[in-house]
Image (spheres, rainbow, N blue to C red):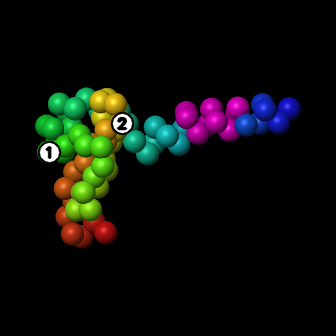
């Protein structure tokens, strides 16, 4: 019974929480929105989305007011 609880919890996370926080983006679309696909964002950048490239994220240079 406990395994069903964990399975339901995981499915809810994958279905609702994960898509709300980030989406998969084509690297060209990331570049068109003035972002860059990188493995890690610089401290002056913030993560916007996840690139379709393996283990890369779309980073966008943030303003100093976005702390």
Label whose residue precedes the other's in the sequence (2 or 1):
1
Locate the N terminus and report the quarter of the image it occupies.
top right
Residue 65 position, x and y percent, is 24, 70
Q: Which residue is mark 2?
A: 55
Task: Tell me the mark number nearer the camera, choosing from 2 and 1.
Answer: 2
- Tell me the distance, in whole angstroms, between the alpha carbons under discs 2 and 1: 19 Å
Is residue 65 shown in magenta? no
Please give the name of the residue rendered at 23% of the width and 40% of the height, measured from the top-left corner.
Answer: 37
Q: Which residue is mark 1?
A: 34
Q: What residue span does the magenta drawing correspond to? A: 7-15
Helix, strand or loop at disc 2?
loop
Provide the major secondary structure of the magenta segment.
helix
Query: Looking at the image, how many numbered discs can be counted on the residues?
Result: 2
Q: Residues within 10 Å of mark 1 (few under 14, many from 20)?
A: few
Q: Is residue 14 left or right of residue 35?
A: right
Q: Quadrant of residue 7?
A: top right
**Residue 3 percent coordinates (x, y):** 78, 32
Give the residue at x 77% y 36%. 5
Residue 27 image offset from top left, x and y in percent: 22, 32
Callout 2 environment at 10 Å: few (<14), some (14 to 19), or many (20+)? few
Q: Quadrant of residue 58?
A: top left
């Amino acid at each position: 019974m406990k395994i069903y609880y964990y399975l339901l919890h995981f499915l809810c996370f994958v279905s609702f929480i994960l898509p709300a926080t980030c989406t998969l983006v084509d690297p060209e679309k990331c570049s068109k929105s003035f972002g860059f696909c990188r493995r890690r964002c610089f401290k002056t950048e913030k993560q916007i989305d996840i690139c379709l490239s393996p283990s890369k994220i779309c980073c966008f240079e943030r303003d100093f007011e976005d702390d």
